[in-house]
Image (cartoon, rainbow, N blue to C red):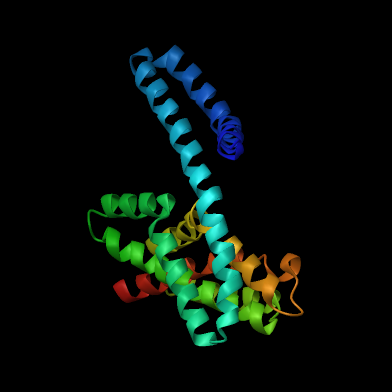
Amino acid sequence: MNIIPNEVKKEFIEVISSVGPISVVVLLFLFFISRSDLLSFIGGAIMVILGLTFFLLGINLGFLPFGEAIGSELPMKGSLTFLLILSFIIGFVATIAEPGVRVLSNEVDYVSGGAIPELVLLFSISLGIGLFLSLGVLRIIYGINFSYLFIIGYIFVIILSFFTPPNFVGIAFDAGGVTTGPVTVPIILSLGLGISSVLGGKSALSDGFGLIGLSSIGPVISIMIMGVLYS
């Protein structure tokens, strides 16, 4: 009966410790520079704190158990193709729901004057995450060394950067960063831990982690390829 209140309290404290300091700094700035926006900022800060608290509560109570359950049940089905396809779908859909990805896509659309459509960018980023999440799942199953995948991935990124328009290079690297948000991280992390925990000879500590870092290369490559095609 006390699980939910305790979780709410825990998440609220974490959000306050994260949002509180920057809110105080901005509040002081507005107090001395532009007091007309003071009440609007206070109201917005309260809504952000409450919103993030319940958002993270939902992630921890719903998405984390979901990811672990999916990750532990999928390998039991015995179909590698099914596992990879579903991993791709999970990564793709989770990225579409990621707030940071939405913000980046919207801002790029606005700044470019519609030259880089929001939906095109959104789906390109999601495609990159989905493909590289499937690659990460494949790595867990076959025990491929992470170093090889990272080296190959970033060599490909470096090569692509010579052919990609400068505007798209910056967007590509930002796309890799915004995908590590409060929606994709719990799902990808719990998926990797779930899969590695049920496979014989796999360690949740050494095999379950690294999926997020590997998956974040995907959007960088997909946006660079999109830039080459656009040029």
Instruction: Find residue 70 and report its horizontal and vertical position in percent.
Output: 54, 68
Q: Which residue: 74% across, 76% down?
A: 202
Instruction: Find residue 27 and report its horizontal and vertical position in percent.
Output: 47, 19
- Which quadrant of the structure image shows residue 185? bottom right
User: From the viewer's perspective, is 112 left or right of 182?
Assistant: left
Residue 10 vertical placement versus 172 (above, below): above
Instruction: Find residue 102 and report its horizontal and vertical position in percent.
Output: 36, 53
Q: Quadrant of the C terminus?
A: bottom left
Q: Nearer the viewer, residue 30 or 13?
A: 13
Q: Nearer the viewer, residue 226 or 206?
A: 206
Q: Which residue: 33% across, 49% down?
A: 107
Instruction: Find residue 41 and report its horizontal and vertical position in percent.
Output: 39, 23
Residue 185 seen by the camera? no
Residue 55 vertical placement versus 222 (above, below): above
Q: Which residue: 42% across, 15% down?
A: 33
Q: Nearer the viewer, residue 82 or 42?
A: 82
Residue 69 vertical placement versus 83 (above, below): above
Labels in figure, total: 0
Q: Quadrant of the N terminus?
A: top right
- Which quadrant of the structure image shows residue 226? bottom left
User: From the viewer's perspective, is 76 left or right of 46?
Assistant: right
Residue 148 seen by the camera? yes
Q: Nearer the viewer, residue 168 or 128?
A: 128
- Which quadrant of the structure image shows residue 98? bottom left
Q: Residue furthest left?
A: 114
User: From the viewer's perspective, is 229 left or right of 146?
Assistant: left
User: From the viewer's perspective, is 162 left or right of 139?
Assistant: left
Q: Which residue: 63% across, 72% down?
A: 195
